[in-house]
Image: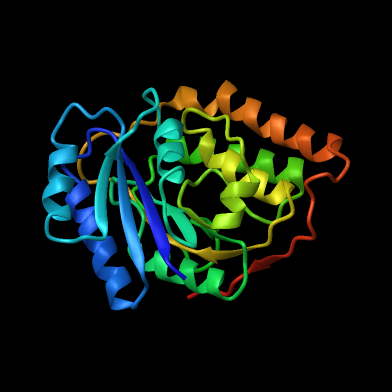
Amino acid sequence: MMLSVVIPARDEAGSIAATVSETIECLERAGIEHEVLVIDDASGDDTAAVVEALAAEHPAISVHRSHHPNGFGFAVRAGLERFRGDAVAVMMADGSDDPADLVRYHTLLEQGYDCAFGSRFMAGSRVEGYPPVKLAVNRLANWFVRALFRLGYNDTTNAFKAYRREVIETVQPLFSNHFNLTVELPLKAFARGHSFAVIPISWRNRSAGQSKLGMQEMGGRYLFIVLYVFLERHLSRGDYYRRSRTVTQPSR
């Protein structure tokens, strides 16, 4: 199973080289066929040039300027329109996600799950340097989603997830232009009956650059997409629904 890794990046020249290099190294070590697509979201620094230098030495790496307007969700969507793999993972450019978890995601997909989700907040996970205020807002938002959908998963807002190609086709059209895409993708996958497994993952706060997620992103845009998918699930009368299965994997 070929795994594509989509990395949206805006002004990430300070971290993108390490993120891409560590990802390639980890996937090669595991013997996983792969490609890494960095989607440049109108960066004003040398993000694209840094990736181009890496791509000159490694054919599995490529960088593409997003043809959509600025926005995290737009950049991810640009990557989802281009990937060639049997499955795709969305990964952050700032080095916060552990590439070793990509290998574990790939294993879950090969076992037959449609989606591989990680949780930073379950036994076996490791979190370093999460800002306290954002952490409090994150836990409240995830509690709300979990209660609304009766979903056995506590980290829906995390972007770092992997999906089989058929899932990406099933959840179209995508509407989110910004960070609310992080909840639209998994919730639509769940609402449309795809199976998923959850594993504990690692997360560390960025060491370079600035976060592009403002606290206002936790408001109306997130609420809109959560309620949209909720209504779709309950008013579509099962038009999209398949029998799903949810599994929480043991700790490492």
Residue 126 seen in the current view: no
Within the image, what quadrant is residue 66 found in?
top left
Q: Is residue 71 above or below residue 147?
A: above
Colour theme: rainbow
On the rendered structure, is 194 left or right of 205?
A: right
Snapshot quadrant of residue 46:
top left
- Residue at left offset 33%, top offset 59%: 35
The percent position of residue 153, horizontal first and vertical second, equals 64, 55
| Callout count | 0
Q: Could you say where residue 195 lies in the image, as x and y percent from the top left?
A: 68, 61
Q: Nearer the viewer, residue 7 or 19?
A: 7
Residue nearest the observer in this picture, 231 or 49: 49
Residue located at (64% from left, 25% from top) = 224
Q: Nearer the viewer, residue 100 or 32?
A: 32
- In which image quadrant can residue 157 be found? top right
Query: Does residue 120 lie above or below 234 as drawn?
Result: below
Q: Is residue 191 visible?
A: yes
Q: Residue at x 36, y 24 (%)?
A: 70
Residue 18's x, y, as percent? 19, 55
Side of 28 where 127 appears, left or right? right
Question: In this view of the protein, which residue sits in the foreground, 110 or 205?
Answer: 110
Q: Is residue 222 above or below residue 35?
A: above
The reply, left or right, for residue 207 in relation to residue 184 is: left
> Picture coordinates of residue 90 (x, y %)?
43, 50
Q: Is residue 99 left or right of residue 125?
A: left
Residue drawn at the location 54% of the way across and 74% of the way down: 110
